[in-house]
Amino acid sequence: MAIDRDTVLRVARLARLELRDDEADRLTGELGAILDAVSKVAELDLAGVPPTSHPLDVVNVWADDEPHAPLPLDEAFANAPSREGDLFRVPPTAGPEVSA
């Protein structure tokens, strides 16, 4: 499967991306290489291969929710950088325009 520059530009427009000419050219080549690689998989005879979503036999381990006694506040705040009453006090993550 091939992709041309017009298709790249159309998809970019649908995604509301503005591409420069050099970016459109580069993406056309890169997407073409990706589509070529994917098309090679389609050439394989996979008739006897069962469908899978993961190469390893992964099984989720779930535990039932069970109520427990809450952690004592002093233990919960033991590693906190700062505490204000029963709340964690953390440094601001926004710029200086937001006051703590």
Image: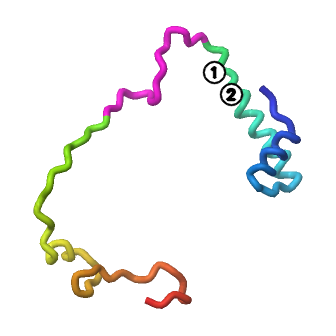
Does the magenta segment cover residue 34? no
Looking at the image, residue 84 sits to the left or right of residue 9; the answer is left
Give the Cα distance between marks 2 and 1: 7 Å
Q: Which residues are magenta?
A: 45-59
Residue 87 lies, in percent from the top left, at 27, 81
State the residue in front, 74 or 34: 74
Q: From what the image shows, is residue 88 above or below residue 9? A: below
Residue shown at 19% from the left, 72% from the top: 76
Q: Are marks 2 and 1 in contact (CB under 8 Å)?
A: yes
Residue 86 lies, in percent from the top left, at 22, 82
Residue shown at 88% from the left, 52% from the top: 21
Q: Quadrant of residue 25?
A: top right
Circle 1 packing at 10 Å, graded few (<14), some (14-19), many (20+), is few
User: Which secondary structure type mostly characterizes the magenta part of the structure?
Assistant: loop
Question: Which of the labelled discs sits on residue 37, or is there none?
Answer: 2
Amino acid at the residue labelled 2: Ala
Looking at the image, residue 73 sits to the left or right of residue 24; the answer is left
Amino acid at the residue labelled 1: Val
State the residue in front, 37 or 93: 93
Circle 2 packing at 10 Å, graded few (<14), some (14-19), many (20+), is few
* Image quadrant occupied by the N terminus: top right
Residue shown at 69% from the left, 23% from the top: 39
Residue 37 lies, in percent from the top left, at 68, 28
Q: Secondary structure at mark 2?
A: helix
Residue 42 lies, in percent from the top left, at 65, 19
Q: From what the image shows, is residue 17 above or below residue 98? A: above
Q: From what the image shows, is residue 41 above or below residue 85? A: above
Looking at the image, residue 8 sits to the left or right of residue 62; the answer is right
Q: Which residue is mark 1?
A: 41
Residue shown at 88% from the left, 41% from the top: 6
